[in-house]
Amino acid sequence: MSLRKTVVEQFKNPHGFLGRIAGWIMANRRSNRERNEWTVALLNVQSTDRIIEIGCGPGLALEACLARAADGHVVGLDHSPTMLDQARARNAEAIREGRLELRLGTLDDLPATGAAFDKICSANVVQFLPDRGSAFRKMYSVLNAKGVAATTYMPRGKNPNRENALTMAEDVRRHMEVAGFTNIRIEELPMNPAPAVSVVGEHP
Ligand SMILES: C[S@@+](CC[C@H](N)C(=O)[O-])C[C@H]1O[C@@H](n2cnc3c(N)ncnc32)[C@H](O)[C@@H]1O
């Protein structure tokens, strides 16, 4: 496997020693902290909200959600046990208090029926989802009426640019619209070398 493929794989499904390093980088890189904080800020979290993060990685956005939803409940979903270990260590107190639950798995593992969440977020995960149509249908099905979902993405790879970010944002917007989301808007966070984008939509 090429070096680039090895690195991408460790951000897609961190595992082993290299996976722990990838998690450490995500947790400590200033731009990633900023991107996660910005994503959560877009959700307008209320103190009693039930929130799920898809692909929570080392748990930065979970931490930001927990700080806002003092009387709510937060779920972190990730298919990597290595990442759940790091998210658990970062948010141990909230787990002890019963405010945070970590689940190993993917969107396919969530029950299809029954609105369960007021807010859904993800940061730099959408590019790894195998079927975006099905992913946004599932997100829609687990969101309460008036619930909000924010999907953040920042392009990587060779010479990423704003065009790459907006192309993904448009694809996400289209899938959200088909799934039934309304009031969909695209937000931008200036970053180097390309902006982060977040597509925010509501369940009517
Ligand atoms: C680039 S990392 C981002 C982590 C975190 N959101 C952040 O911004 O710090 C991508 C994360 O998504 C997880 N992931 C990728 N595909 C997934 C899927 N289909 N279901 C659940 N988790 C997934 C990976 O294990 C990894 O933790």
Image (cartoon, rainbow, N blue to C red):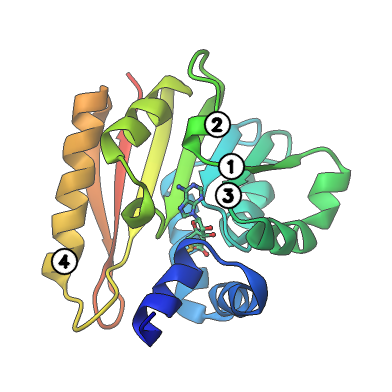
**Category of crowding for the residue at label 1, using alpha-carbon neighbours closer than 10 angstroms: few (below 14), some (14–19), many (at least 20):** some
The residue shown at (11%, 67%) is 163
- Looking at the rendered structure, which numbered label has been put on residue 73? none
Q: Earlier in the sequence, mark 1 or mark 4?
A: 1
The residue shown at (63%, 63%) is 58
Q: Secondary structure at mark 3?
A: strand
Q: How many angstroms separate mark 2 from mark 1 (CA)?
A: 6 Å
State the residue in front, 10 or 160: 10
The residue shown at (43%, 66%) is 35
- The quarter in which the C terminus is drawn is top left
**Category of crowding for the residue at label 4, using alpha-carbon neighbours closer than 10 angstroms: few (below 14), some (14–19), many (at least 20):** some
Contact between labelled residues 1 and 2, with CB atoms less than 8 Å apart = yes
Q: Secondary structure at mark 1?
A: loop
Residue topped by disc 3: 78
Q: How many angstroms separate mark 1 from mark 4 (CA)?
A: 28 Å
- Looking at the rendered structure, which numbered label has been put on residue 164? 4
**Residue 68 rendering spot, x and y as whole percentages:** 63, 47
Mark 1 Cβ and ligand 1 under 8 Å apart: yes
Q: Earlier in the sequence, mark 3 or mark 1?
A: 3
In this orientation, does residue 188 appear?
Answer: yes
Residue topped by disc 2: 109
Residue topped by disc 1: 105
Residue occupying the far right of the picture: 96
Q: How many angstroms separate mark 4 from mark 3 (CA)?
A: 25 Å
Contact between labelled residues 2 and 3, with CB atoms less than 8 Å apart = no
Q: Earlier in the sequence, mark 4 or mark 3?
A: 3
- The quarter in which the N terminus is drawn is bottom left
Specify the amino acid type for callout 2. Answer: Asp
